[in-house]
Image (cartoon, rainbow, N blue to C red):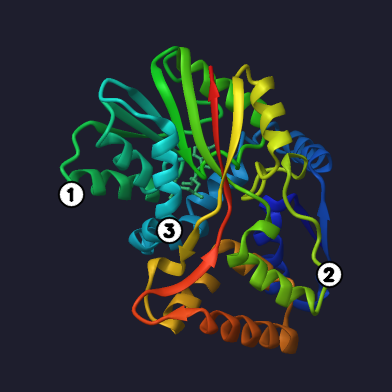
Amino acid sequence: MVLGAGFGGLEDTTRLADEFGDEVHVTLIDKSEAFEMNDNISRRCGGAVRANQQQAEAWNGRESAHFVDHADRYDRQLEPFTQALLEWARLEGHHVVLDVGCGSGTSTLAAATRAGRVTGVDFSEPLVELARRRAQDAQIGNAEFVIADAQTHQFDAGTFDLVISQFGLMFFDDPVAAFTNIRRALRAGGRAAFVSWQGLAANEWLTLIADAVRRHVELPEFGGLSRGPGMFALAQPDDITTLLGAAGFEQVACHSCTPAIILGGGGGPDDSVDFLLDMGMPKGLLGFVDGDSRDDVLRTVRSELKDRYHEGVGIHLGAAAWVVTAQA
Ligand SMILES: C[S@@+](CC[C@H](N)C(=O)[O-])C[C@H]1O[C@@H](n2cnc3c(N)ncnc32)[C@H](O)[C@@H]1O
């Protein structure tokens, strides 16, 4: 029996199911059950389970590997969101900025070209190492990186004019504690601007796979804050507004951003499809099917994606995120 907690647990769950084959039953549970389970485990381990342990392990292992290996391709694929984030952040040359969940440093380094000083924080050592190398290679001297959990790290209070994040704020096991901690790092009147994915249904680059999987099996409902940490935890504007309000932010606004992205940042048709199928969420979705069903899903997805290939450019697909702005 394998237990998958919330959407953040989906990939782990399906991977375990893959490993153990037919004997496995996958049960997705909601966040309150997940916390109860964590408490039980924590008690049995003498309280040794720390905040965001599962996510920290994932982002220091398999989740970061694809990002590290293909950082430039991810940058090109996510470029429209980086641009939207920079636009809404309204950075100025004197701003002191914190980039949470900075990963390989894309938004940190982009912000550093417009702001006074930028600190990227992330608990993934391989990604921060890469971010530091990229800063050095680009000779960007006003960006620094800290390896830490943003939910619990003791930032100097009132230090930053602005907190930004590109898809780095959806993975907290206690979002109110995390956003409260992050707000504490902002000076009075400081601002936040961050990007989080809209739901699965709004993201064509994933619905294509989800729809093919659904022809064989039912998929559970994904996303929303109540289902725990994961890619779609901040997909609902109501959740975002309530969460940020609880953490002390004001004037919360969610701006819809729906560009077409170029899969893998461009490349040949086979190579672009391979890139997609190797990403965490697509792999999680594919984990719901096996045998002939899986072969059929892969055939369908490959053929539909190749139909969208533009010679010399790549595969264009619709994507949707919120750019959230708020004031401390
Ligand atoms: C989807 S990646 C985005 C990375 C980068 N911002 C980008 O756009 O390429 C999410 C990032 O958030 C980081 N992260 C998740 N939870 C975190 C936490 N509690 N503290 C610090 N970093 C965290 C992960 O390590 C990962 O690098």
Q: Position of residue 298 (x, y in %)?
A: 63, 83
Label 3 sits on a secondary structure element that is: helix
Q: Which residue is mark 3?
A: 67
For the point 73% across and 72% down, which residue is it? 211
Label 1 sits on a secondary structure element that is: helix
- Disc 2 under 8 Å from ligand 1? The reply is no
Q: Which quadrant is the N terminus positioned in?
A: bottom right
* Sequence order check, earlier mark of 3 and 1: 3
Q: Position of residue 125 (x, y in %)?
A: 40, 45
* Sequence order check, earlier mark of 1 and 2: 1
Q: Which residue is mark 2?
A: 218
Q: Are marks 3 and 2 in contact (CB under 8 Å)?
A: no
Q: Are marks 3 and 1 in contact (CB under 8 Å)?
A: no
Q: Is residue 181 above or below residue 23?
A: above
Q: Residue furthest left?
A: 139
Name the disc covering residue 137, or none: 1
Q: CA distance from mark 1 to mark 2?
A: 47 Å
* Neighbour tally class for label 2: few under 14, some 14-19, many 20 plus, Cα within 10 Å: few
For the point 39% across and 15% down, which residue is it? 159
Label 2 sits on a secondary structure element that is: loop
Would you say 212 lies left or right of 321 here?
right
Q: Amino acid at mark 2?
A: Glu
* Neighbour tally class for label 1: few under 14, some 14-19, many 20 plus, Cα within 10 Å: few
